[in-house]
Amino acid sequence: MESPPSVPQERPWVRHYGSIPAELPPSPQPSLAALISASAERFASHKAFTSCMPNGMNGALSYAQVDEASDAFAVYLREGLGLAPGSRVAVQLPNCLSYPVAVFGILKAGCVLVNTNPLYTATEMTHQFRDSGAEALVIVDMFVDKLPEVLPHTSIRQVVVASLAQFFPPVVRQVVQAVLKHWNRVIPPWPVAALAMGQALAEGRRLRQARSVDVTGYWRDLGPESLAALQYTGGTTGVAKGAMLSHGNLLANVAQIEAMAGSHIGDGEECVLTALPLYHIFAFSVNLLAFFKHGAHNVLVPNPRPIQNLQRAIENYPISWISGVNTLFNALLNEEWFSLYPPRRLRAAAAGGTALHAAVAERWETVTGTPLVEGYGLTESSPAISFNPLVGTRKPGSIGIPVPGTEIRLVDDDGAPVAQGEPGELTARGPQVMQGYWQQPEATAETLRDGWLHTGDVAAMDEDGYLRIVDRKKDLILVSGFNVYPNEVEDCIALLDAVHEVGVIGVPDADSGEAVRAYIVTRGELAPEAVKAHCRQHLARYKVPKQIEFVDDLPKSPIGKVLRKDLRAEYLKDHPQAATDGSRPC
């Protein structure tokens, strides 16, 4: 029997789209700067962002205020610092009101955003800033003490410092800053010459007026192929690489996200809880860009740990959307204040970054009466590749169906398509796929082959086109949704004189999905705490091994490569319960 022409055999998922368009229409805006400007004009009087502290103290900005402040920051970058179009500007901020102002200002200036994790060590910061060639840095005041070790090795010539309480009402800001500085003692003195965010904006406003600057002129020539961001991600070599995401990549993914979730998004009606960090590609595309386009009120939580930090945000605002990872949703469900009084206006929640456990999704829907759907993606795909539909068939344990405009092929080791239902490496092609890795032609050629993005994850597709991750080709470890690459951790541990050999794997963990476990062959005395202390000096905390085992030798291939799969198999054999509770990548 012939298949209907509207549903080609190689795209069985199309018949489950319903009202979702199979292909993406052209974007009405040529750049993110144009999208930001259009939304700010349309929703000018609406509240855009509120930053909510754990005690409920807060500050807010309207769409008009964000637009004006980001315009001022764009002028500061171009006129004050003299940055050229395409110059890289690093942003190292947690969720706070300065984040959208800085990011939107960078995009409006025609510059390139370099998102940076605020928890990075000086070693990690130096690599990312030097590799990207960043010329300016916007950093939160809590981490300026790292800069003397970093700046001499980079091209950064101007530092702008922001606070968590930036843009709060004056009295509230003074209270928050005083508590952070004098009570919590988390704000060190500035050890380098820098400009406060308020000063940078004041200078931008002065220059704009003095020179009659038309800010739209900075981004008028930007198009879909223009580079928007360098989003750094690890690799099997352990060296972080900058995925080059264009304006077109990110605009396409915004359109794909709204195509899949648009049935539950009303223009100017939504209030989205942002607990995931905006510098992470998931929250960046979903919470920051997609919801800004639709005039949502974004409630920012600077730090979601402990989970009680979310209580005031959830209780004080009419939350209608939540994005997060499995551990966040599970933690909320274990809080009495949440399970007894879930958000009354909640419409849906989206999970990504790591595996969504079926039990968590089922319990979430029971407690809140709303769907919790899982998606799949990578930094290299801006990030969404697939998503479970909010309307129609949702399959537990599945990462859903490809988002519109995306082609999927599952291939064997020789690159040949596998039979339907059989596992194969998931490869994807679509307008959201990156341009390549910044200044890494060999790594780009390995990951992008004939236009197809090779994800390194092994998946199976059922007869309806729904995908399920069954294994990972790469040895990626996912700790609370954050990527940890074994080689990077191994390289760090190997620096210790007492270490002869080391192998690192990810093992199931109830709190973080997976935990980093290190196997070490020593040639002298070495304590587990010494290894952890060493790693904390060079790696972000989520990369530091949670478990350490000293062994006599490591399993190796004939050419001497440590066989992580054998270490993993041995661990699961010794811990059979972990095999049934294990996680998978998403």
Image (cartoon, rainbow, N blue to C red):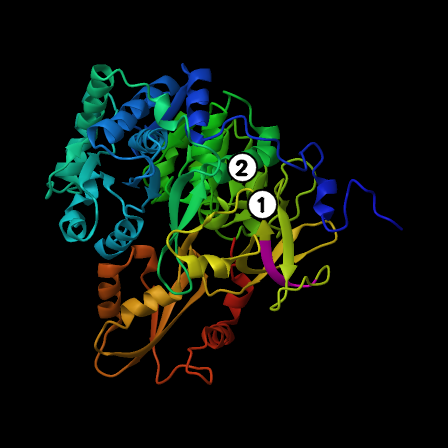
Dot 2 and dot 1 residues touching (CB under 8 Å): yes
Task: Choose top left, top right, bottom left or bottom right for residue 265.
Answer: top right
Q: Amino acid at mark 1?
A: Gly
Q: Nearer the viewer, residue 489 or 83?
A: 83
At which x and y percent is residue 292? 45, 27
Residue 336 visible, this angle: no
Query: In the figure, 527 relative to 453: above or below?
Result: below
Q: Amino acid at mark 2?
A: Ala
The magenta-colored residue range is 422-427
Residue 108 visible, this angle: yes
Q: Which residue is mark 2?
A: 252
Q: Is residue 480 left or right of residue 416?
A: left
Q: Is residue 327 left or right of residue 426?
A: left
Q: Nearer the viewer, residue 542 or 279?
A: 279
At which x and y percent is residue 544? 31, 61
Q: Main secondary structure of the magenta part?
A: strand
Q: Secondary structure at mark 1?
A: loop
Indicate whether residue 303 is drawn in magenta.
no
Give the residue at x 32% y 41%: 303
Query: In the figure, 467 relative to 471: above or below?
Result: above
Indicate whether residue 425 is drawn in magenta.
yes
Give the residue at x 71% y 48%: 11
Give the residue at x 69% y 63%: 418
**Which disc is residue 410 wearing?**
none
**Which disc is residue 430 wearing?**
1
Task: Choose top left, top right, bottom left or bottom right for residue 82.
Answer: top left
At which x and y percent is residue 482? 40, 53
